[in-house]
Image (tube, rainbow, N blue to C red):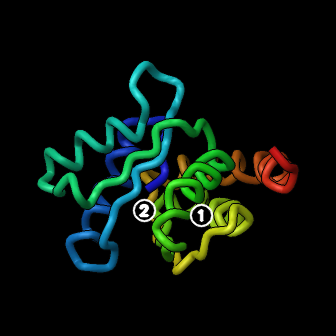
Amino acid sequence: MLGCRGKAGLIRRLDHGIRLFRSGAAPLLLLSGGGTGPVPEAEIMHQMALARGVPETALLVEPRSRDTVENARETARLLRPRGGCLVLLVSDRVHLPRAALLFRLAGLRIAGWVGVPPTSTRWEVGAAVRECATFPKSLVRALLPR
């Protein structure tokens, strides 16, 4: 699950991922995102997942990334020792095409992605505009060596 700047978005994404976990579609929840606040987004999701009854053994926390390019790189770093897991991405649906490409460029195998419904059409239009503006920069960063 990818982090999100707003708390409502973070909760929507987390709850969607927990539903997938409980249905058996995802044996592990990787919570990704450092964010800009004093507590990493991944740690906030970790505490919320535990409070919602997800066992600690089913959670993997990636608290360092600050954006989707770093989400992909850090996720690849954490999953590589586990033998190249298939990844099911959970994020807002306008974010998923860019996220899926960046995760593939990081060497991850994407089993699919699940788009979380938007809070409103107005929000989704604004998010789509931001995605279009961010896509080229993300692609260049993902393709350049670190």
Marks 2/1: CA–CA distance: 12 Å
Question: Of marks 2 and 1, which one's residue comes earlier in the chain?
Answer: 1
Relative image position of residue 84 (x, y in whole percent): 54, 73
Q: What residue is shown at x 36% (from left), y 41% (from top)?
A: 8
Seen from the viewer's position, the closer of residues 74 and 100 is 74
Q: How many marks?
A: 2
Name the quadrant containing residue 96. Answer: bottom right
Relative image position of residue 137 (x, y in whole percent): 83, 46
Q: What residue is shown at x 87% (from left), y 50% (from top)?
A: 144
Q: Quadrant of the N terminus?
A: bottom left
Q: Residues within 10 Å of mark 1 (few under 14, many from 20)?
A: many
From the image, tell me which residue sits under label 1: 96
From the image, tell me which residue sits under label 2: 117
Q: Residues within 10 Å of mark 2 (few under 14, many from 20)?
A: some
Relative image position of residue 90 (x, y in whole percent): 45, 63
Extreme residue in the top direction: 38
Extreme residue in the front direction: 81
